[in-house]
Amino acid sequence: MTAGGGRTALVLTGGGARAAYQVGVLSAIRELRGQAVGNPFPILCGTSAGGINAAALAVFSADFNAAVRKLAWIWRNFHVERIYRTDAAALFGTGLRWGAALTLGWAVRQTPRSLLDNSPLRALLERVLDFSAIGRAISAGHLHALSVAASGYTSGESLAFFEAAAGVQPWRRAQRVGMRTQLGVDHLMASSAIPFLFPAVHIHREYFGDGSMRQLAPISPAIHLGAERILVIGAGRLAEEGRQRTESYPSPAQIAGHALSSIFLDSLAMDLERLERINTTVSALTPAQREAAGIGLRPIETLVIAPSQRLDAMAGHHRRTLPPLLRTLLGGVGAMRREGSVLLSYLLFEPGFTRALMELGYCDTLARRQEVVDFLRL
């Protein structure tokens, strides 16, 4: 329970390498808290790469400051090889499988699962995260709940897999389900399985992909888990620039980047708008009036921190840091050109880019120092 009553939730959105920005924000929060003990975010909700960050915070929730330091060290020293294979055998093998599927589909019985092999990420998560620590943190009172979102390819539902204190009930809404379970590496791999790029993961009876897909209400799990205040850290600007004149046909990378931005960014902006309207309506009634009218809603205080700069433009400055063979592969679809930098920004797990994102997150947060201090009751 946080100071001032009511639980505070942290919502971390998806975005591949862009999630390094979240760690910069958390580093600034750690600095603003000083020597304060405890976990300021007893409810942690994450999707895709944000789900991985949330899980790491949950595992080490007994010491928030130490958890952020661990996260920052990992993100500052990332290389793409720790997320997906970039060796010649893996990349050429993928090219051959996709080429065969496209040209000889009538004769090839097994279709390729993804463009990239992210088995290194699984190995990394298994090595650095003790998932049994989540349950222990909940029992000790360091954590109230952790949820990780994934999207079912068969059902089309957005599932929030959660581990929480006793009393938290599963939920079902239109195309949205909250399912209590013991979280593990499969849930993180499923939540971060960006379509086409990374393979889907089979959990229970269904294959799941990136949790940002069909996630119509990314803030909803935090509310279901009992949050009264929600800090949302985005992985892209919520207000993009207007239309610009162009005559050239979009490259595959530009189209893919546009699709990924639609998956990762659009639903958050719409959900925040919807929450603001609900807050305005609910705040117009007293608690007694809401109870008399049978309105179970309550006002939710929110704070959103999102990048002040275009992350695709930042990625463009670091494109040459990728391994040569991967640059060649991405160059073939236009990702090494300026208009393809959006796709690049999701895949550029290299220290030059991730450190720049962390610095931006840190500076953006300190620029709003008083808002953050007031929100967290510091």
Image (spheres, grey):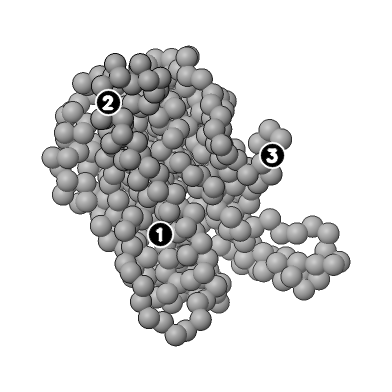
10 Å crowding of disc 3: few (<14), some (14-19), many (20+): few
How far is disc 2 from disc 3 in space, using C-alphas? 43 Å
The residue that disc 3 covers is: 206
Residue 325 on image: x %, y %: 54, 71
The residue that disc 2 covers is: 285
Q: Give the mark nearer the N terminus: 3 vs 1.
A: 3
Which of discs 3 and 1 lies nearer the camera? The answer is: 3
Q: Quadrant of the C terminus?
A: top left
The residue lying toward the viewer, choosing from 257 and 197, is: 257
The residue that disc 1 covers is: 350
Which of discs 2 and 3 lies nearer the camera? The answer is: 2
Q: Give the mark nearer the N terminus: 2 vs 1.
A: 2
The residue lying toward the viewer, choosing from 87 and 156, is: 156
Query: As shown in the figure, which amino acid type bears the numbered disc 1?
Result: Glu
Residue 37 on image: x %, y %: 24, 23
Relative to 305, is 226 on the left or the right? right
Query: As shown in the figure, which amino acid type bears the numbered disc 3?
Result: Glu
How far is disc 3 from disc 1 in space, using C-alphas? 33 Å
Please, which residue is most extreme toward the bottom here? 247
Relative to 189, is 347 on the left or the right? left
Q: Quadrant of residue 275?
A: top left
Q: Give the mark nearer the N terminus: 2 vs 3.
A: 3
Up the image or down, 366 lies above or below 280; here it is below
Q: Quadrant of residue 170?
A: top right
Secondary element at tag 2: loop
